[in-house]
Image (cartoon, rainbow, N blue to C red):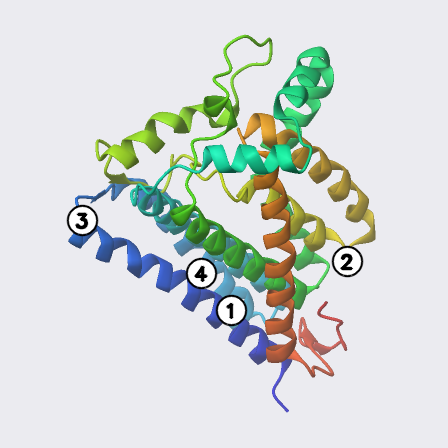
Amino acid sequence: MISGATRLRRLDNVIWILIALVAVFIPITATVSEFTIALQSFIAPASVCLLLKLGAYYYGDRRTAYDLASVFESTTQLVAFSAVAAPLSYIAAAASLSLQDAALAHLDHAFGFDWKALLALMDNSPRFFKLMHAAYLSLMPQMIAAVLLLGFTRRLAWLRVYMLAFIFAAVVTIAISTFLPAKGAWLHYEITDTTVALPLSHTSWPVFFGLRDGSFRLLTAMGAEGIITFPSLHAALAVILMMAFWPVPIARWIAVAINSLTIMATPIDGSHYFIDVLAGIAIAILCFAAARALVMRLIVPVTSFAIHGAAAGENLF
């Protein structure tokens, strides 16, 4: 029978293949276009990945501590994919297809959503807005925390579900944004008179328009801006994090509370239409289901799994 460790390595190989495919696309695009790769921005992520990969090798092959090895391996994957996905979103925006803001705003109205009413509510509830703002900023710490918690509680297959769902959602979101680009609700509605500070996404506006008009052609890893409007990747990741934390009772409802606030903050802080958020939620559910199906196919049946050298009969989910 194929061991649990071998099946986990197969899953990791699938994840690395997906990351490699995205990574290879970047220099190819730079070669046939006017893009320049900011190599220095990849040095820090590459160095971190190297150190983490060494940790995964040590604990996986030398110590057979598969929980620790999984934490190192999945953190490496998280850093590596984040570094290559950001340039991919820049390439997507550079396609410069017609902006879809009018259509997205129309869909909001058709569903009965009022973006300006939400902004007014935030204006009148500054303390609640600060709470949602903090939740919105918590996404990356949560993503790292999910890796650590799932690894140390030995939910090693579920950890791979989470990583695959993240990659699937990011790639699907970037692909859709290529064909349905938008500048965002703040700019579409020309908001100027508000007590709420500009959204966190406002720093991405010059980059987004520079990619569209050709004045910005730099592919970066560290320091890259989030430029996707439709669908909302932020909303998608918030839902994926809820599902990632779900098997851990102590973290389940904390994750639901924080990420519910994140989703509520996304239209204002992320300059998203409501339809962006709904699309992001739908993508998250579909991608998580696809990731779980793939993991189940590759890892089941597993009747036992060695933890620290002992046949512990682990439930990897």
- In front of the other: label 3 or label 4? 3
Sequence-earlier tag: 2 or 4: 4
- In front of the other: label 1 or label 3? 3
Task: Give the quadrant of the C terminus.
Answer: bottom right
Sequence-earlier tag: 2 or 1: 1
Q: Secondary structure at mark 3?
A: loop
Task: Judge left or right: residue 54 versus residue 221.
Answer: right
Determine which quarter of the picture holds residue 253: top right
Sequence-earlier tag: 1 or 3: 1
What's the residue at 40%, 34% (across, down)? 225
Q: Position of residue 9 (x, y in %)?
A: 53, 74
| Neighbourhood count class around disc 2 (C-alpha, 10 Å): few under 14, some 14–19, many 20 upward | some
- Can you identify the residue that label 2 sits on? 247
What's the residue at 23%, 38% (across, down)? 217
Real-space CA distance between mark 1 and mark 3, rounded to the nearest whole angstrom: 32 Å
> Which residue occupies the foreground of this view, 170 or 113?
113
Q: Are marks 2 and 4 in contact (CB under 8 Å)?
A: no
- In front of the other: label 4 or label 1? 1
Real-space CA distance between mark 3 and mark 4, rounded to the nearest whole angstrom: 35 Å
Q: Identify which amino acid the numbered label 3 is placed on.
A: Ser
- Can you identify the residue that label 4 sits on? 54
- In front of the other: label 2 or label 4? 2
- Can you identify the residue that label 3 sits on? 33
Task: Judge left or right: residue 261 versus residue 13.
Answer: right
Q: Identify which amino acid the numbered label 4 is placed on.
A: Leu
Q: Position of residue 213 (x, y in %)?
A: 24, 33
